[in-house]
Image: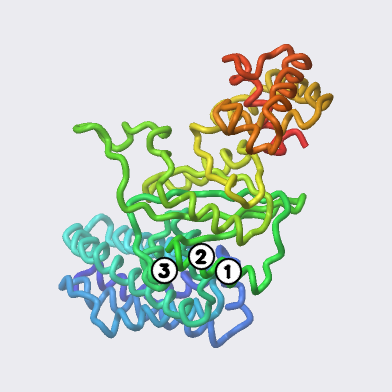
């Protein structure tokens, strides 16, 4: 055995103890090791075993055996069984990898610059075998989650792991019987009065997750009782970039064209929630899902809130780009709010304008939707012009009053 490997073997016990101490110091969920001597001994035993196997296998570039991988998977099972979160699991892997690299560097320094060939052999072994070990650890972790966790919670973990870019999403997807596509439509349901999470709603959401094969998670609850439901609809095919252009050359407004099956998902989840919702969606490839969530969340805050009915639909950046821009310019937003205040002086003027623009200013369709005579509709539109000085059917009217309507219905001025 060369000097680098001998030095690592000599330090194995000390390094293993340092790893356990680092876990308890830097990862709050490992605090129990200070109180549970048996669990601490088990963790220390595993740390020492792994370092010894590293020294045994790496000099000859031998692979971890099936028994080795089973042992690593059992540690993943043990920690999942203790209730460790996905975030803590990811931190454990980062800490472990960082410490192993530090130990190799320290052992190399102890040789006063020698052992370059051995260092290269060690690193050649470390990368692929470390990847195999981490994969086994993830598989063991997920096995426990699959046995102990309800389906909807497993799907929520999958959604969270996808949004965080966590590699464990591959194992979680297999556990819930889903495939991972190249892209998702990330959709946020903004709910002003979030429903209580009872068994019936949980079962209904679970059935929709299975039916649409779309992982779902609840977003943070607001201090005012508001909340979010976040869905990830898989997309296995979509618009391609022009020939020879890189994928990022496709503008967001093009990429966010609503997939044919997304409106059905929105209707189904809206009906299950039974609440007024505003829905924003954004499409992105797997590596960009966190950005897509931020975009969908901003869109949902600018989109109008509606009851779960045929009128509830997903909004994209192309639908509310004016309102998003207005929200960042207080001077313009205040002016639009002043116009909205003037509309309070007429009968159902805001509702009328909403229907008018949703039906592309077709008077007959608008009157039918409002269940009023067309002369009543004309009277209301004249009243809007009188109160605001803007003709609803003019270019200026469409640009200005449609923004007024959407800002009102979004609840931004509430």
Percent of width and height locating residue 309: 61, 51
**Count of marks placed on residues:** 3
Quadrant placement of the C terminus: top right
Q: Quadrant of residue 359?
A: top right
Mark toward the viewer: 1 or 3:
1
Residue occupying the far top of the picture: 389
Earlier along the polypeptide chain: callout 1 or callout 3? 3
- Disc 1/disc 3 C-alpha distance (Å): 21 Å
Q: Kindly state the secondary structure of the residue where label 2 is placed.
A: helix
Colouring method of the image: rainbow
Q: Which residue is mark 2?
A: 208
In this image, 107 relative to 156: left or right? Answer: left
176 left or right of 351 in image = left
Q: Residue at x 29, y 38 (%)?
A: 247
Residue 271 percent across, percent down from the top left: 61, 58
Tag 1–tag 3 contact (CB < 8 Å):
no
- Furthest residue to the right? 345
- Labels 1 and 2 touching (C-beta < 8 A): yes
Nearer to us: label 2 or label 3: 2
Residue ID at (46%, 50%): 262
Residue 268 placement (x, y as % from top left): 54, 58
- Distance from the alpha carbon under mark 1 to that under mark 2: 6 Å
The residue shown at (46%, 70%) is 19
Q: In the drawing, what numbered circle is on residue 172?
A: 3
């Amino acid at each position: 055995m060369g000097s680098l490997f001998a030095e690592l073997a000599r330090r194995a016990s000390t390094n293993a103890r340092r790893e356990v101490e680092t876990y308890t110091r830097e990862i709050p969920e490992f605090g129990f090791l200070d109180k549970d001597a048996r669990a601490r001994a088990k963790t220390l035993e595993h740390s020492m075993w792994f370092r010894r196997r590293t020294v045994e296998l790496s000099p000859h570039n031998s692979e971890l055996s099936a028994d080795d991988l089973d042992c690593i998977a059992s540690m993943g099972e043990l920690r999942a069984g203790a209730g460790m979160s996905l975030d803590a699991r990811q931190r454990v892997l980062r800490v472990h990898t960082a410490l192993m690299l530090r130990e190799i560097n320290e052992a190399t320094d102890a040789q006063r610059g020698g052992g370059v060939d051995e260092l290269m052999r060690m690193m050649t072994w470390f990368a692929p075998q470390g990847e195999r070990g981490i994969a086994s650890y993830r598989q063991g972790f997920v096995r426990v989650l699959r046995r102990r966790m309800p389906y909807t919670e497993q799907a929520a973990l999958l959604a969270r792991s996808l949004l965080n870019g966590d590699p464990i999403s591959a194992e979680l997807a297999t556990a819930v019987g889903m495939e991972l596509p190249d892209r998702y439509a990330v959709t946020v349901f903004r709910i002003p009065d979030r429903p209580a999470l009872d068994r019936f709603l949980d079962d209904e959401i679970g059935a929709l997750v299975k039916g649409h094969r779309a992982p779902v998670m609840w977003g943070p609850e607001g201090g005012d009782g508001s909340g979010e439901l976040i869905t990830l609809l898989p997309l296995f095919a979509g618009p391609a970039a022009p020939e020879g252009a890189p994928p990022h050359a496709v503008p967001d407004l093009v990429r966010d064209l609503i997939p044919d099956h997304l409106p059905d998902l929105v209707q189904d989840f809206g009906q299950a929630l039974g609440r007024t919702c505003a829905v924003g969606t954004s499409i992105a490839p797997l590596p960009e899902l966190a950005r897509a969530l931020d975009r969908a969340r901003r869109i949902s805050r600018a989109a109008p809130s509606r009851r779960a009915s045929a009128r509830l639909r997903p909004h994209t950046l192309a639908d509310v780009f004016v309102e998003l821009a207005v929200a960042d310019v207080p001077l313009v937003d205040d002016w639009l709010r002043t116009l909205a205040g003037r509309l309070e002086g007429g009968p159902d003027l805001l509702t009328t304008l909403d229907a008018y623009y949703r039906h592309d200013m077709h008077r007959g369709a608008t009157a039918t939707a409002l269940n009023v005579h067309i002369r009543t509709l004309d009277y209301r539109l004249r009243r809007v012009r009188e109160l605001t000085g803007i003709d609803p059917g003019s270019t200026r009217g469409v640009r200005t009053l449609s923004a007024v309507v959407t800002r009102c219905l979004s609840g931004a001025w509430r």
